[in-house]
Image (spheres, coloured by chain):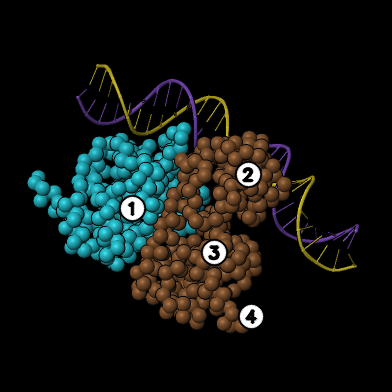
Chain colours: A brown, B cyan, C yellow, D purple
Amino acid sequence: MGKSAVTIDIQNTLQALDLFKSCSSSFWNTVKQYGYSSRIEKGRVLFLNDETAERIYVIKSGWVRLYRETLDGAQATIDLVGNSSCFGETSLFNDDRHTYSAESAEDCELISLPFSLIKNELFSNQNFVLSILSAIAKQSLQQTREIEHRTLQTAPQRIGCFILRMVDAEQKNDLTIHLPYDKSLIASRLGMQPETFSRALKKLKDETGIAIKGAVIEIESLDTLSSFTCAGCSLEFPCPDLKRKNR
Amino acid sequence: MGKSAVTIDIQNTLQALDLFKSCSSSFWNTVKQYGYSSRIEKGRVLFLNDETAERIYVIKSGWVRLYRETLDGAQATIDLVGNSSCFGETSLFNDDRHTYSAESAEDCELISLPFSLIKNELFSNQNFVLSILSAIAKQSLQQTREIEHRTLQTAPQRIGCFILRMVDAEQKNDLTIHLPYDKSLIASRLGMQPETFSRALKKLKDETGIAIKGAVIEIESLDTLSSFTCAGCSLEFPCPDLKRKNR
DNA sequence: CGAGGGTTTGAAGTGCATCAAATAGTGTGG
DNA sequence: CCACACTATTTGATGCACTTCAAACCCTCG
């Protein structure tokens, strides 16, 4: 694949995101020069919390885990971001310091852009400011929900909630769900241990009649699942989604 | 106090916030017409999650609890906001629907402004967009920390962290802290039960030698307290604060 | 002084974590 | 196609942190 083919590819990928819909043509020109596309193997640390941030990232494929880590190595997963999601943008408003660490949870294709490029656009394009404002506000709302979930939902309910969010991302008729990544990753995404996940999934099955075949889940009844799950939540299924799937 | 005195007072209070520093003179003119100042007794519900939002609020005095509530009445406190803080602004980017419920945790003096006024400024004043972007980004960072704390810190550590945040808000020499509101409110702010708070505070005292006299805490040694507390956190004391005190 | 909140204490239960080990699943080279 | 190695997942046993429910205590204020 030649240079121009790569850059066209970058541009196409970025333009699929709402965030970049309003970008100027001069922005796209500099993207051609300074935008990187790279393949990253699983388990690579992309950056660490509190380090100086220099680039913004967009995921073309794969999953990236955002987390925070204490001195003695305990980690809290903040989010798992996938296809067509952006990360690393929060540090733009935190004195260019990362607000979390990032690690590839699978082999990934990533696009990255230097901050200077984003900042130029931020200062020259009013619409882009509104786009990024909207993106960060959605992220904040998502975090509000996350705090609620981790406070009020039991482990089986958090898993049910995760499964339900994957349903309304697709057709509501198809009640067969493929878990998007490893169970132990889902566990960390939901703030629990892998062992707890395993047991809680079994409990969820007993309570709601879902069928579990490896990474494939079949929902017997949406009503049963959602009434069990959403009892511990301020929202009812189908919850309004945030235009970011599989999270 | 006459009308003009009240409106001048509103303007002064708002201008103390970074958020409103860049507002235009036409904004301030409409504030004179449409800004409300009101006294609210303790325990009043200001709005409920998912309701249509119409106003943005600023606190002149008192504390307001932001929370989410399930159908069966369980609540998760998202934040407690006080002096010179703004709340209700997130719904501007959530189709004018509140992203949490709000209740006065004490008698309060509140200022409120209609959304229309904020939106006008948002569309006409580029600097105001940047101000609100900065405010929401800080809020998002704060929430990221909150998720980390609730995942990685024990109850005594969360209390220690709360106390330490009140230290660096003041002089670092004065190691006498006055708890800003009721202990049971602090407990809900930290995501634990009042009983747990009471016991955990005692444990914190045993571990770090702090003295507890009602709502007054005396720190024996900052080092002892911070090394106990920050072991469960990705940051070290003094943690960079977010220009919002007593939270 | 007495009423009513806020706070503490006690006793018992629950949910999740932890540690250890077994099992299932996946990809490899023979 | 099988045996092996390696990882992911499950299962078991135990412990701890926090919750829950109940009651006592304390403080403030009419």
Residue flagged by tag 3: what amino acid is it? Ser
Residue highlighted by disc 1? B89
Residue highlighted by disc 4? A1
Q: Mark 3 or mark 4, which has the lower sequence index?
A: 4
The front one of B123 and A119 is B123
The front one of B2 and C21 is B2
Circle 2 crowding by C-alpha within 10 Å: few under 14, some 14–19, many from 20: some
Q: State the residue at coordinates (26%, 59%).
A: B120
| Residue A184: image location, x then y, percent | 64, 52
Q: Do pointers 3 and 4 mark residues of a single chain? A: yes
SS of the residue at dot 1? loop
Residue highlighted by disc 2? A196
Q: Label 3, label 2: how many angstroms apart (C-alpha)?
A: 30 Å
Circle 1 crowding by C-alpha within 10 Å: few under 14, some 14–19, many from 20: many
Where is the C terminus of chain A found, in terms of image quarters? bottom right
Q: Label 1, label 2: how many angstroms apart (C-alpha)?
A: 37 Å
Residue flagged by tag 4: what amino acid is it? Met
Lateral position of residue B43 relative to residue D30, left or right: right
Question: Chain under label 4?
Answer: A
Report if the CB atoms under discs 1 and 2 are less than 8 Å apart. no
| Residue A19: image location, x then y, percent | 45, 65
Q: In this view, does A7 lie above or below B121?
A: below
